[in-house]
Image: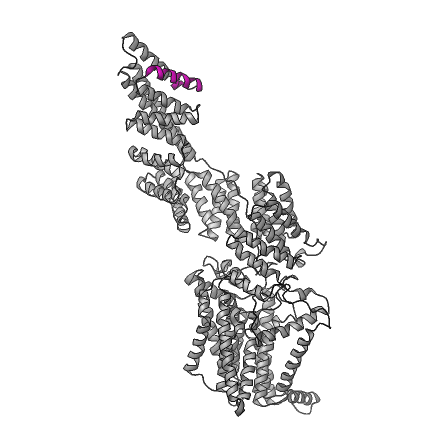
Amino acid sequence: MAAMSWKEILLLTGLVVGCYWNSLSCGFAFDDVSAILDNKDLRPSTSLQNLFRNDFWGTPMSEERSHKSYRPFTVLTFRLNYLFSELSAASYHLLNVVLHAVVCVLFLRVCRLFLDKTSSLVAALLFAVHPIHTEAVTGVVGRAELLSSIFLLAAFLAYTKSTASDHSIVWAPIALTVVLVAAATLCKEQGITVVGICCVYEVFVAQGFTLPLLLNTLRQVVQGKDGFPYAVLQTLLKLIVLVISTLLLVVIRVQVIQSQLPVFTRFDNPAAVSPTPTRQLTFNYLLSVNAWLLFNPSELCCDWTMGTIPLVESLLDLRNLATLVFYTFLGLLVYHSLRYRHSSAKTVIMALSLIVLPFIPASNLFFPVGFVVAERVLYVPSMGFCVLVAHGFKIVSHKGHLKKISWLIIGVLLTTHAVKTFNRNWDWESEYTLFTSALKVNKNNAKLWNNVGHALENQNNYAKALQYFLQATRVQPDDIGAHMNVGRTYKNLNKSKEAEEAYLVAKSLMPQVIPGKKYATRVAPNHLNVYINLANLIRANESRLEEADQLYRQAISMRPDFKQAYISRGELLLKMNKLTEARDAYLRALELDPSNADLWYNLAIVNIEMKDPSEALKNFNHALELNPRHKLALFNSALLMQESGEPKFWPEANRRFLIYVEEEPDDANGYFNLGMLAMDANENAAAERWMRKAISLQAGFRSALFNLALLYSQSKREVDALPALDELLRHHPEHIKGLILKGDILMNHKKDTSGAKACFERILHMDPTNVQGKHNLCVVYFEERDLPRAERCLEETLALAPNEEYVRRHLSIVRSKMAAMSAAGQPLTSAGGATISAKEEKQKRVQRGAEEVAEVEEEGRGADAVLKRAGNEKNVRKSSTEGGGVGVDQSESLDSSQSDKQTKVKSTKEIKDIEKKRAAALKRLEEIERILSGD
């Protein structure tokens, strides 16, 4: 075996980089969304143990919706990517390119076992640039193929060293082979097929058997003519070790999937559910389709499911000729390789083993898989194809008159393949470019129309997305997911009637439940979301809540472990004020998924509605234990602690609000509540800073502006409060409390009675029965020394509030003053009123103080508005994490139109503060009245 040179390694690496550098600008597309963006196993907050409990998509292997694809080593590399760059797609693509270069170098090393130096390099170069690899290299999830191939080739190379120069067994390489086989299998299931490749190598290459010689040897042994030759015994011993190791790995793998095969539908693989002979004819025809993709990768498509390749339903179908040609060519190669002992035969048999054995798990011949054709599964089989091409090149180039032609052909082949690969990478730039490129190749696949629609939907281009979804229903009229997509898009376009009609069509396509038969074995579990989506739509109508609940219960009856149905039903029951049932629904969902932070959060919301803040806080904390940066749990738990009135909770509430604003730096509510916490702690400078930050993010923030003005007023910075009040009243001219506070400041600190008068008159214009505004206007009249008008004003105020003793007493004082002035012959507008007016100002400030208490109670935290907003966000969040399932077709996304009510909790501290202020107000009132009476 010729050694590899650094020049060859650099050549291969440079060629790989040249073909795939543009993949670094691609994003996450197709299966990447489920495997990367939606996979919680990548997050550092998720336990590493979950990688070995869940499938490739982050779904627990025990769940029926799991695809049973167990690839923890591959997910571990995704997690390392996330650790270094989180969700920056470029780093994921870069690692894939590096891994592909590693595979090319290892493949060159393997080729040197069967080919000469030039031919092996040709094979490696062809493998490096073959366009069929773009899905495996540019698609991030193709890393499973790359990693599995590295360990597969390494295992094979290790096994080739298991025979010493004296033909004895060397056990260390065999042990290493077993370890590497296990690693390859933990990257992707087909890695285990390297054991078969090793067996072929041992029998037909290392031991030099041909099929006739092998059969003759076995016949002699059976007939007892000869004992087992020593070489045969050694071979058997090595193969037995490999086979036993393989069986052990298979047993472990079966235990991992809990002896369950994944559930696929006829949409994923139509031939798998077809009758005989359609199933057999179609699956055999697909072998020739895969072979043609290797031979002529001119039309590549990311998805070959559904109606892409029509079923072969008859022996008279002309496509059977392709199957016949394929098997004829394959048979000739097998015959050549097994009958002769020369090096060419050995090269061909190893090439065939690389093509056939790794492809068997994806061939549908022994068990159905979830696809018809998948380009990335041809990654390893293409190695055998490249060996065959290079071997043919070697034979032709040794014929003198064809040497130049053969080099020209190889040069053209490498160039065209490299250009095709480079251009194909651009198709993977985004989901929209990927699926539109697929539609150019195949217009009979409804999933492609659906996925283009999804890409447009993500751009909020609902009108255009609807056209693609409708086309999907025309291409595949019985596609439940397509009708669900139509319904959801109509809903986004605010066409509820059309949306309901589309959902009802999808529901009508659901098969009827057969008693005693598992429902999930007959329909994709995600199709049950049609009940959820339809219920979510009709529950917007208050008169149809019971009908919506019936749909949720119907979905639960079909799948008692349908977690999303419990979640959605819990939200509905909360809306119907059936709090106990809502709590039970969430508890049932938590039994199915105890590690779901959103469920703990929703349960906490129910606890708030049930007036159980301590239990709510406990469940918020559960959510934060599972996801320490759960934004809504951070916000609402901090708000709950803030409103508890317990100073011991304030530091933790402050910490959670700070984390929240790190996660949501543009949400003014977080800064506002930090400001309110600072006000509670008498940290006025911090409170001012946070309030101003909130106002800068949300112009006209009502509560922040008023409380900032109130902060200035309480800090004896009344003049600074005026700009905040002016901005408040510019955005909210009807804000009565702001007008009262502004009027108070204008009169008492700016001595602007006309400005104060205008504020109080605006209040009465909006609400003629406002006692506070009316009384304060009376004070303005008194300040203006117009006692008759002040008297009439107080009489009108008393008529509005006949039970308010302070108004009655003030009216009595004014009348007494007027009588005294009349008896003394003084005009009723004399300057003597100024003294009383000043005292009345104190009285008014008492009233303002009481009003501040009321204002703090009404607006102090802005809790009701903030919690309602958070409730709406909660539903958006929950839909994004629970909607749909793992998989390629996004056609089962759930609607998320509901909102949850929240409960505002008044703290004990607030009540005590109110009582203290009221007591102080009464004490000052008595003092003012004594002064007035004395005067």
Report x, y in % for residue 711. 33, 36
User: Does 745 appear above or below 382?
Assistant: above
Magenta range is 786-808
Colour scheme of the picture: one colour
Report x, y in % for residue 75. 50, 64
Seen at 58% across and 55% down, the residue is 467
Return the residue nearer the eye: 666 or 357: 666
Return the residue nearer the eye: 669 or 758: 758
Q: Magenta span has 329?
A: no
Viewer can see residue 120: yes
User: Does 874 appear above or below 104?
Assistant: above
Q: Quadrant of residue 773?
A: top left
Viewer can see residue 179: no
Return the residue nearer the eye: 113 or 891: 891
Helix, strand or loop: magenta stretch: helix
User: Does 26 appear above or below 585?
Assistant: below
Return the residue nearer the eye: 459 or 798: 459
Q: Magenta span has 805?
A: yes
Seen at 52% across and 72% down, the residue is 133
Q: Among all residues in the image, which is located at the extreme left? A: 831
Report x, y in % for residue 766. 43, 27
Which image quadrant: the C terminus? Answer: top left
Report x, y in % for residue 618. 48, 45
